[in-house]
Image (spheres, grey):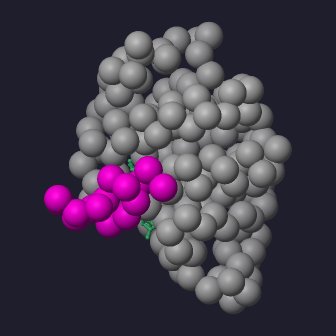
Amino acid sequence: MTSGSDSIVTVVEGDITGQDVDVIVNAANAKLLHGGGVAAAISRAGGPVIDEESRDWVVANGPVGPGVAAVTSAGDLAAGHVVHVVGPVFVPDGDSEDKLRRAVTTALDAALGLEASSVALPAISAGIYGYPPEEATLVIATEVAAWLGEHPGSFTDVRLVAFGANTADAFRSALRTLGS
Ligand code: AR6
């Protein structure tokens, strides 16, 4: 797999809220309070419906736990839905990697359930939750590649969206590492 233009998986440097895809994945917290990072950007750009539906989701279902995705509409965004998953707060030598992998598969499973053909993911956990970006990007890219291998023909367009050149480079380098 490469990050070339003919690959399903591409790296995009920029703001995930501008992505014209069926599903945008949010790096949320368990209470779906979108106060900072990419969550706040999605909430701001999509408009109040995202916060309203998020609040309703938590009232109905409780906090978003591991292996769970909360789906809301995307308001003013080009996307049809936002899939909210919660990545781990990074703990060195803990089980952060397993938790991050699970967040990725949970998000992709949910997008598949929505019959999406295109999906954009941010560098989940690599901001406020403190996962070193070089490591988080490798875990995310590896899990995306593994998931796609198990779900051939599922999506036509999977974007790894990086807010900043360093994270974009890390995603690209992860895809190169997986290139065999
Ligand atoms: N588009 C794409 N990526 C972005 C954007 C954007 N507009 N804004 C930030 N990033 P973070 P986390 C990148 O902190 O670490 C929130 O408050 C950012 O540079 O958003 O999982 C939630 O509500 C980083 O590379 O998510 C939770 O409380 C990546 O997105 C908590 O933060 C993830 O950073 C979750 O922390």
> x%, y% of residue 159?
57, 33
Is 70 drawn above or below residue 78 in the view shown? below
Judge by depth and name the residue closer to the eye, 162 or 109.
109
Q: Residue at x 49, y 17 (%)?
A: 1
User: Picture quarter containing residue 91?
Assistant: bottom left
Q: Position of residue 46 (x, y in %)?
A: 70, 58
**Region in magenta:** 88-102
Q: Position of residue 29 (x, y in %)?
A: 48, 71
| Left or right, residue 178 beside residue 2 | left
Tell me, yes or no, if residue 79 can be seen here. no
The stretch drawn in magenta includes residue 180? no
The C terminus - image quarter:
top left
Residue at the limit of the structure toward the bottom, as seen here: 59
Of 64 and 126, the residue lying toward us: 64
Q: Position of residue 50 (x, y in %)?
A: 71, 68
Q: Residue furthest left?
A: 93
Please state which of residues 9 and 149 is positioned toward the viewer in this rendering.
Answer: 149
For the image, the number of numbered tags is: 0
Q: Residue at x 60, y 53 (%)?
A: 107
Indicate whether 2 appears above or below 63.
above
Residue at 44% in and 35% down: 141
For the point 66% across and 50% down, which residue is it? 109
**Residue 91 highlighted magenta (yes or no):** yes
Q: Quadrant of residue 174?
A: top left
Examine the rendering and report whether any part of residue 150 can be seen: yes
Q: Is residue 57 above or below residue 175?
A: below
